[in-house]
Amino acid sequence: MSLSLKDTVLCSVFAVALPVGQMLFKMAAIANASLDGPIVLRLIKNIPLMSAFAWYGITALFWFYVLTRVPLSTAYAFSMVGSALVPVMAWVLFKEALNWQMGIGFVVIFVGLMIIAQARPA
């Protein structure tokens, strides 16, 4: 049977949560340049970095919940879409460059996800 609407939404939320964490890490890297002092103090004072760690802790608990409902092989396919969203979000938030190869790669990943999401167990 294919995924229920609830499971599809849960997997999709997780897929978006991953690139949000990556954006927090990029913000932390940018913030690090304006901090001074010893490395340990810079890390502690880096609010985006602490936020990224907290975000990933919450996301890990959410992933655990998703895996209680959805097979790993299916749920992980959604996380691949999250990985494909990272360049798009970096383009929007940080004005990083995109190219046509990234666009084609995203389409391929998305089509693969649609195939996996509709797959019936053997």
Image: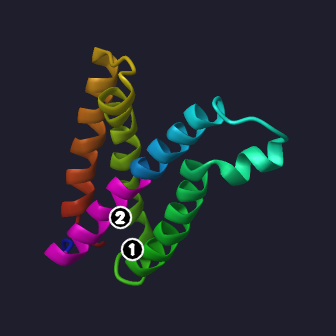
Q: Give the magenta-colored segment's residue range.
A: 4-18
The residue lying at 38 percent from left, 32 percent from top is: 90
Q: Outermost residue toward the right? A: 38
The residue lying at 36 percent from left, 63 percent from top is: 14
Answer with left or right where residue 106 lies relative to residue 114: right
Placement of 32 over or under 100, stated as above or below: below
The amino acid type found where label 2 is placed reads: Thr
Residue 70 picture quarter: bottom left
Q: Is residue 16 magenta?
A: yes
Residue position for label 2: 74
The amino acid type found where label 1 is placed reads: Pro
Quadrant housing the N terminus: bottom left
Rendering coords of residue 3 (x, y %): 21, 72
- Tell me, yes or no, if residue 92 can be seen here: yes
Residue neighbourhood size for the residue with mark 2, other residues' Cα within 10 Å, grouped as few (<14), some (14–19), many (≥20): some
> Is disc 2 placed on a helix, strand or loop?
helix
